[in-house]
Image (cartoon, rainbow, N blue to C red):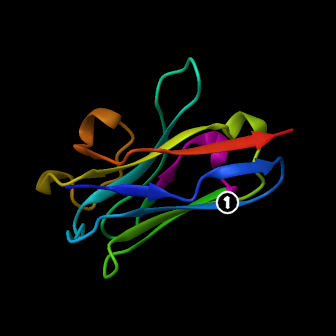
Amino acid sequence: VQLQASGGGLVQAGDSLRLSCRSPGRTFTGWTMGWFRQAPGKEREFVATIASGGKTDYLDSVKGRFTISRDNFKNTMDLQMNMLKPEDTAIYYCAAADYIGYSGRTLRSRNLYNYWGQGTLVTVSS
């Protein structure tokens, strides 16, 4: 399964970006999807997750600013990022967990995801 992340770029603090994740030719209905990010010198961290039924969970520092969504018919997942801050600067990765036992659950642990996109860079200047 190949996940394709896109939408990153260079923006100023307070601006918005919308990241997208696609799974060409493969449906991810029933999968839990997530976004993670990795800043320079730091470990990859959880940002947001959305279960197959639409339940969501967010990193505390992005709650109220980021919104995760999915379209199971189009096999896409988005992350709308508003009020961006310099500390949001990182490479953002989309991920998918297809284990049937996780269906309907939100997942924060990166170890539970078995498919990853290539990452898209988000840079927020102050």
Residue shown at 77% from the left, 51% from the top: 11
Q: In the figure, residue 1 lies in which quadrant?
A: bottom left
Single out the residue that lies furthest toward the bottom.
Answer: 73
Residue at x 29% of width, y 64% of height: 23
- Nearer to the camera, 10 or 49: 10
Quadrant of the drawing holding the C terminus: top right
Per the rendered image, the range of residues in magenta is: 57-65
Q: Hey, which residue is sitting farthest right in the picture?
A: 126
Describe residue 97's horizontal placement relative to residue 93 as left or right: left
**What residue does disc 1 label?**
17
Q: Amino acid at mark 1?
A: Leu
In this view, the residue in front, 105 or 112, is: 112
Q: Nearer the viewer, residue 80 or 117?
A: 117
Q: Residue furthest left?
A: 100
| Residue 63, image x, y percentages | 64, 51
Relative height, residue 101 to residue 92 (above, below):
below
Q: Nearer the viewer, residue 90 or 55?
A: 90
